[in-house]
Amino acid sequence: MKKKFYTRRDFLKESSAAVAAGTLYLNMPRKLLAQELKKEKVVLIRAKDLLDDSKKVRADNIAAMLDKAVMTLYGTSEPLTAWQQIIKPQDIVGIKSNVWGYLPTPPELEKAIKHRVMEVGVAEKNISIKDRGLLSDKVFLNATALINTRPMRTHHWSGVGTLLKNYIMFVKNPSAYHGDTCADLATIWKLPLVKDKTRLNILVMITPLFHSVGPHDFNSQYTWVYNGLIVGQDPVAVDATGVRILIAKRKEYFKEDRPLNPPPKHIFLADTRHHLGTADPTKIELIKLGWQENILI
Amino acid sequence: MIASNINLEEFLPESVDVWQSEGEGRYYDRQTLYEYINGGAELYLSYGFFCSINKIYQQSGQPDIIVDIFDMGSSENAFGVFSHSRETNDKQFGQGSQYTSGLLLYWKDRFYISILASPETAESKRAVFQLASQIEKAIPHKGSIPEIVDQLPPEGLIQESIKYFKHHIWLNSYYFISDENILHITEKTEAVMAKYQKNDNKTILLLVRYPDQEKAVLAYDYFLRNFVPEMKEGLTYQIEDGSWVACKLDGSLIKVVFNASEEQNALELLGTIKQKNK
C-alpha cells in the first residue's frame, strides 16, 4: 500500500517525491538529476535599488522588474507583446491582491499590473484589484482572467502565506480549509470561480517575513530586504521557489536548521495530491535576473 | 487552574503614558477568534484558547499600541503558547517574557499577553513596558509550569528551547520528524521538546506523556514502525544522515532523543530523564 505521509527518513533516503517535499521541509539541496522533462519556467528578479531611503517601493523600478520578468517568462523583447499573451482585450480581469497590514501587496505593483492590463486593451471597468470582498465584486464574479499577487510570509498555521493561500478569499468560510494545517488549499483553485482562470502569479519577496511570533505573526526583526519578485504561470512552482528562499534565510539567521513550523504541506500536496503544478525543484527552470548578492537560492 | 469568566477589561488601563485607549476592548472566543486573526487563530485554539480581549492605544505621531490578553484556560497552556515562539528567556515581565523590535510577549497565570507597537520608537518602547507592568500587577496569581517540563534533565539543557504542546502539529518545531501524527499526540497527551548542547551538537529530546500505558504502548509501536522499523532490539539506531535516534517507553511516557552525534550521548540523555514527581 502506498504510504500517505513522509518522515524525515523518507527525505534522507531520497526517493523522488520525498526529495521534492524535502526541499520544502528541510534545508536539503536540490537533487541533481538529468531530467528530460519539460520544466516549469519561474523567473526570480531582484533590484538592489528597489526601495528608496524611507524603504518605500520605487514605482518605476518595480514596474521595470515586472516587465523584465514577464518578457523573460514569455520570451519577448517588449512588455506589451508578453502581456498580449497573458490577457486579451475582452477579458474581465481580477487582480487578487493582499491587504495584510504589516506586509501588503505594494500599491506600486498593483498599479504596474493594471497599467499593462489596460495597455493590452482591457477597459478599466473590467479590472478590479481586491483582496477582501471578492464574492460581492462584479468583476471578480464575472472574471475571465485572474492575476494573483501577494508577499510571501511565514504563517502560524499553514507554515507560509502563499499564492496558493491567497485564493482563500474566494470561499465563504475560510476556516473550513484550515484542516491539517491548510493541507488542501489547492482545492480552492478548482472551484468554478477560479478554475483555469489564473494567467500570472507574482510572489512579492521585497521584505519577506521569515519567522512568525505573537498573535499578529509580524515582527520587523524577522523581515529582511530581499527586493525580489518571483513570477510564473504555475503557482505551486512559484510558491515552492519562495519557500526555499525563506528556508535558506532561516538557516542563515538562526545559524542552524530551523524547519518551517508547521511544514508548508499545502504546497507539496498541491503538487502530489491535487496536481495543480509542480513543487519539485528538479522540474522547475529557475531564471535569476538582476541583483545576485545574497540570493539564497 | 480552570478558566472562569474574568472581566479581562479590568486588566487594562484607560491610558498608558500619553497613549489613550480608543474605547472598550473587543472580546473574542473560540468561535470568533478567526474574525480577528484569521488562520493564526488555530495556533491559540491548539493550546486550549478560552477567550481574549484586544485593545488599541493611540497617540498622534507614534505607533498604535496593540494589546491582546489571551485567557488560555490553564497556566500550562499559557506557558505552552508562550514557549511556542520564544527565542530568549527573559524574565522581566510575568513568568517569562520576550521583547523584540516593538513586540513584547509574556505569560502569567493562565494569561498570555502580547503588546505590539511597530515600528518601535523610544517613547513607544517605554509605554509598552509600562503597560506590561500594569497588566502584570493586575493579574494576582502565578501559574504552575507543566510537570512534564520538570522531567527534563538540566545538564546541557538550553532553557529557551523548551517547547510544551498538546497538538501534533508542533512536533516539527526544531527538527522535521513527520508530516503526520506518528506519536498519536492529542489534547489528552502532554509533550515537551527541548534542545541540549553537547560540544558542537544540538541534540533534541522529546517526552510525551499519555493518559494511560495502553495508549502509550500503541503510540510507541506506531512510532517505531514508521520512524525506526529497524530497531528490533536495543534503544538506538543510526539514521541516514549519520545521527543517532534513541527511544524508550517508560510506563505512560515515551522518551525520544533525536539528532545525537554519538550513540553514547543519546543513551546518556535518555538515561538522565527525571522520574515523575509523585
Image: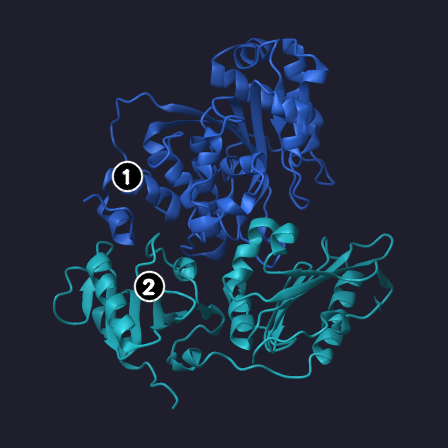
Compared to residue B274, the image places residue A222 above or below, namely: above
Residue closer to the observer: A126 or A49: A126
Q: Is residue A237 above or below residue A69?
A: below
Q: Is residue A192 above or below residue A249?
A: above
* Residue B234 visible here: yes
Image coords of residue B173 (percent x, y): 43, 59
Residue B184's disc number: 2
Q: Residue at x 34, y 58 (%)?
A: B181
Residue A113 falls in which quadrant of the image? Answer: top right
Element class at badge 1: helix
Q: Are marks 1 and 2 on the same chain?
A: no
User: Chain for mark 2?
Assistant: B
Question: Mark 2 is on which residue type?
Answer: His
Report the Cα–Cα distance between label 1 and label 2. Answer: 25 Å
Tag 2 secondary structure: loop
Q: Residue at x 48, y 51 (%)?
A: A250
Asked whether B217 or B109 is in front, the reply is: B217
Going 49% across and 61% down the picture, which residue do you hit?
B46
Q: Give the residue type that dot 1 points to.
A: Ala
Closer to viewer: mark 1 or mark 2: 2
Tint applied to chain B in the drawing = cyan
Q: Is residue A215 left or right of residue B119?
A: left
Residue wearing tag 1: A17
Task: Judge by depth and name the residue closer to the eye, A263 or A3.
Answer: A3
Q: Which image quarter holds the N terminus of chain A? A: top left
- Circles 1, 2 touching at the beta carbon (< 8 Å): no
Q: State the image coordinates of residue B145 (x, y, percent, origin top left).
A: 51, 80
